[in-house]
Image (cartoon, grey):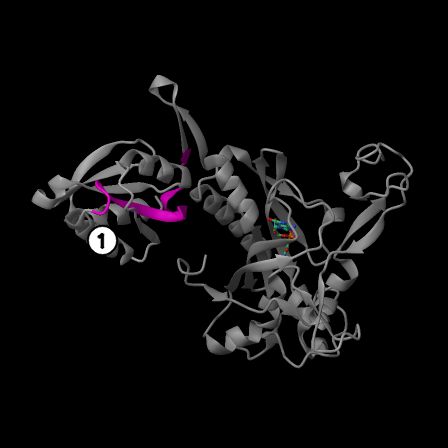
Amino acid sequence: MVYDRDDVEGLDASILTNPKVLQYSGHEDTFADPLVDCRSCKSRWRADDLKDHKCPSCNSEDLTRPRPFNLMFKTNIGPVDDGKSFAYLRPETAQQIFTNFKNVLDSTSRNLPFGIAQIGKAFRNEVTPRNFIFRTREFEQMELEFFVVPGTDEKWLDFWVEERLRWWVEQGLDQNSLELHKVEKEKLSHYSKATIDIMYGFPHGLEELEGIANRTDFDLGSHTKRQSELNINSKVKKNTDSATRLAFQDKQTNDWGVPYVVEPSAGVDRGFLAILNEAYRVEKLEGGKERLTLALKPHLAPIKAAVIPLKRNHAGLLEVAAKIKKTLQGLQMGRVLLENSGNIGKNYRRHDEVGTPLCVTVDFQSLEDQTVTLRDRDTMEQRRLPISEVATHLQGLLTPQ
Ligand code: GAP
């Protein structure tokens, strides 16, 4: 999303967030789940988790009315805990992209449209974290804020929905397990003019993997100074604290205006869960044995290749293996592991399970003719190749098709 495109900058901003940012963004007022308490068993639930207005724990219908519960975590700032000096842990990575908008503009030479992307931790005090890593209190988001000329926002929303679908399929998700849901008007977040959710068929049901929202000029418009001079279309709070103009100057007319923004916002953990779900395979082999494989797309595998000398601690084999490891590691395409444990079969199986796409075995023939055996994770096929060709082979494997 950043390196492969020429219209996106990357950012790594702070997690601790000044409350004013989340006040103007609307999070202090609206970032809440409606909760109900069960008077009978004293449990607490998200209102949308209830079926037939019954407590999921004890079936009692003696429930309180839904009350809003703000999801943001607070922490103290400074040595005195007076309740006044606090910060929030960011509930989304997006807000820091908006507050750093001018910094990015000043250090690049950008014209609209362009984007700023960020990947990092976000925190929400979820009442019902569940379904493995589907909903957690500390999670990783990857968000892109793509700034566009107002009026072109709807076209860009369509563009990013298509692009993000294509991207998920490229990461190994089955097209047939992905669905698009247009969020109903009444359910839109306070900042959104339109949102399309990319849904994935998780083992526990069809759920949101990513949302793509047309946030219009709400965010920059909320955080900027001199709001009244900027023709902001969204309904924003009057900002009496901002010291920075978060706007874009038209190079021809010299007029200042607030760009619209289209935001693809995805959960890394949810993405990873979906990818695990697709990649985890149990194969029946001849003789009743089973093989576990994590058939990750090679570019996502945590270990790209394992180099395995046939015999443990054999100086000659180890020397050749170490050289191959160094060459492959030098490609800087990810981790390459030298396995000096000697048991080829066990090593193959272990690397199948963690998703290593390629094993390179150095044997005694290698010392004579400078060839090695390449063993493929998915087909289990083995073939001999000159050592000099291994790097090119691995590079080909790691380039997404
Ligand atoms: N900036 C917009 C935003 O944060 P969101 O729909 O609240 O929108 C975006 O979150 C994505 O972040 C979701 O589609 C989901 O993948 C992920 N996400 C949100 N809450 C999460 C949680 N508690 N645990 C794991 N992932 C979560």
* Residue 72 in picture, x, y percent from top left: 72, 60
Residue at point 60%, 61% (across, down): 93
Front one among 388 and 232? 388
Residue at image position (66%, 42%) is 130
Q: Position of residue 102 (x, y in %)?
A: 56, 76
- The amino acid pointed to by label 1 is Ala
Instruction: Assign a secondary structure to mark 1.
Output: helix
Q: Look at mark 1 in the image and give the residue it sits on.
A: 322
In front: 1, or 22?
A: 22
Residue 95 lies, in percent from the top left, at: 63, 65
Answer few, some or many: residues within 10 Å of disc 1's Cα (few below 14, many 20 plus, some between 14 and 19): some
Task: Relative to 265, say whether 18 is above or below.
Answer: below
Evaluate whether residue 226 shows in this view.
yes
Considering every residue shown, the one lying at the far bottom of the view is 243
Q: Nearer the viewer, residue 275 or 230?
A: 275
Q: Is residue 174 visible?
A: no
Q: Residue furthest top?
A: 287
Total numbered badges shown on the rendered structure: 1
Residue drawn at 76 percent across, 39 percent down = 49
Residue 367 versus residue 225 in the image, above or below: above
- Residue 121 placement: quadrant: bottom right
Residue 42 sits above or below residue 104 on the image: above
Residue 372 in which image quadrant: top left
**Magenta segment, which residues?**
293-313
Residue sitting at 59 percent across and 78 percent down?
255
Classify residue 141 by image quadrant. bottom right
Beta carbon at label 1 within 8 Å of ligand 1 = no
Residue 13 located left or right of residue 60: left
Quadrant of the rendering where the C terminus is positioned: top left
Query: In the current view of this chain or complex, which residue is farthest to the front?
Result: 313
Q: Position of residue 1 (x, y in %)?
A: 45, 56
